[in-house]
Image: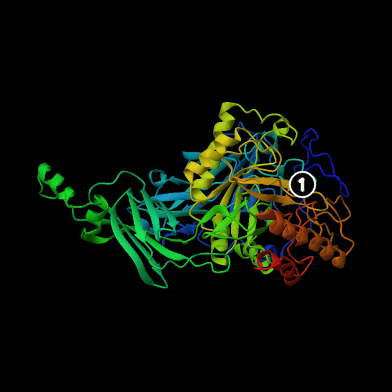
Amino acid sequence: MRFLVPTLLALAAATAPIAYAQDDHVYTSDLVTRWGKAVTPDNAWQSYPRPQMKRKEWRNLNGLWDYAITDPAVVRPAKMDGQILVPFPVESRLSRVARKLTPDQRLWYRRAFTVPAGWAGQRIMLNFGAVDYAAQVMVNGAIVGGHKGGFDAFGLDITDYLKPGQNELMVQVADPNSAGTQPRGKQSLEPSGIWYTAVSGIWQTVWIEPVPRLHIADVRATADIDRGVVEVDVALSNWASDTDAVRLTASSGGKTVASTILRGNRHATLAIPGAHLWSPDDPFLYDLKAELIDVRDPYAGMAERDRHAYDARFTVGETRRYADAEPVGAPRDTVQTYFAMRKISVGQGPVRGQPVLLLNNKPLFHNGTLDQGWWPDGLLTPPSEEAMKSDLIFLKQAGFNMVRKHIKVEPARYYYDADHLGMMIWQDMPSGGGEDQFVAGTSQGQAIFPSATMADHMNELTRMVGSLRAFPSIVLWVVNNEGWGQFDSATLARTVKGLDPSRLVDADSGWMDVAPGVSDVFDIHTYEDKPNVPARHADRVIVLGEYRGVGLPVQGHLWKPGKSLWSYQVAGGDGDYLTRYRTKMEEVIRQARAHGLSASVYTQTSDVEDEINGLLTYDRAQAKASAADLAKIAAPLWASEP
């Protein structure tokens, strides 16, 4: 989102020097969503948090924890300051704290927990959905591990630190926030305009689960609709022996579609005959179960020379041999996941010489919104999954088939819901960098970072891709946004392509286009009254990665009533709002037909703090135009005839 625009109601300087306030209270507004009003310590985010790797046994650790904010030299707080509701960030209203954490402070969490007796003999994993930014984890006073990175999940084996009965869990968090260069999105210690309230600490679900010492660590399923197969990689937590095998079962409606047994840490190809393809209009999903099993050793009793002769009988090697293996006993570990048969690619469209986006080998226009995922009561943490899902439902009803998840990574349940609802996702990498590392559209070069900072950014980028690539709704990765901390764009884009060749990559969304040979799209941002037309490109698709929204303040639903509001243009009322929106969409439709435009991203899904550009108010209580009216305006995008 562009932060220098010609039209606004009021805008404080976004780049003013930071001066930390003596009062650490965070402004939280009186604005609360209907879901936020229903949050209690007992119902805070109770869904299984990792839907693409679901196990039967687990225990949720969300709820009330003790907390303290201290100086960095404190080894352990002498006393705690009060209680905080996990998983809501410490600055949020729903956390029950609403205090600022500065870069020179540390945030502490503490709670007691017990391990179910039925888990005896297994390894106990402690998992965090996300902690912003650097976490150190202690169990019963011993450091068990740490993590740096504000947007990805991590887990620690805490088995050796546990004792019978009650155990103590403590987490220490440091967060430089907007004073640092780490990926953080639009968080700011001094929020105003398009920069929002800083977020620190635990902000996604915490849980424990039992696993065997050797267990399933990752399942990666990649569809190939042209061959009618799904490629599956199952990674185990350690090396596998000759008798450690994985049984894969793909099913639909409870009926087995394909099944095989393979040695652990090996690749499998499952044929999906007559594949039912996934699309926004028909989001069909297949279930996939992965089981870690024991099999009889096919080499048992064989001499070394006979093993080679045995292998030579099978043209496909180990996969065939293990498919015929005899399982022994019950599965040691089981995870449930799912996949979709779908393909995202680039190909010829209706305008000669201009490639377009294809879904399942057919042109499909991506009509999306800039979706920032902020909430007045939970900030980065939605008040509930139902609340988070409600945005997707409204957008589907309003004629959108895509959202650009803007410089934020959501809880995994968001992508699960998008998969099931049929909403395509363009996933941004959260931006970082300091004030002098924001590259303008007229800049002659990219930002310069120290090697360590580049490594941290690269680590978070690759972890984001690795943790989210299982979700079929994600069709495109956005590596950089408007030059905010943009460095070595081509290398980053190539890395993402190498990690996930099944999806497209937008190297630079807006402003500095420096990776034309790598990026699959040419992406401009246009905040003029009438969206500009991107220049045609013979070797990549053209998209409006952002275009100007229409502001409309709705009294009773503003973050700061009577204070500064921020917008690109302001409608005079409901009728004027819809007219302005229609004018913009008609230009998008014209560009799609006349110039081969492949996608457009309207700014934005909802109001956010000072911004009033949303289709929805910040509390999601009111739509500024009906979903039916918006859908009717967008309908010609997919009409077969003008």
Which quadrant holds residue 94?
Answer: bottom right
- For label 1, the residue is 194
Residue 582 appears at what percent x and percent y? 79, 63
Residue 32 appears at what percent x and percent y? 74, 61
Residue 128 appears at what percent x and percent y? 52, 49
Residue 167 appears at what percent x and percent y? 46, 49
Q: Is residue 530 left or right of residue 304?
A: right
At label 1, which amino acid type do we have? Ile
Q: Is residue 344 left or right of residue 305?
A: right
Q: In which quarter of the image is the C terminus?
A: bottom right
Residue for point 48% across, 42% down: 498
Q: Is residue 462 above or below residue 573?
A: above
Q: Is residue 635 above or below residue 128?
A: below
- Outermost residue on the front side: it is 352
Q: In this view, does 147 lie to the left or right of 304?
A: right
Which quadrant holds residue 371?
Answer: bottom right
Residue 516 vs residue 166, the one in the foreground: 516
Residue 126 vs residue 639, the one in the foreground: 639
What count of labels does the image hold?
1
Q: In this view, does 642 lie to the left or right of 423?
A: right
Residue 128 visible? no
Which of the colour schemes (rainbow, by chain, secondary structure, one colour) is used? rainbow
| Helix, strand or loop at mark 1 | loop
Which quadrant holds residue 191?
Answer: top right
Residue 127 vs residue 260, the one in the foreground: 260
| Label 1: how many Cα within 10 Å (few below 14, some 14–19, many 20+) | many
Residue for point 62% across, 36% down: 182
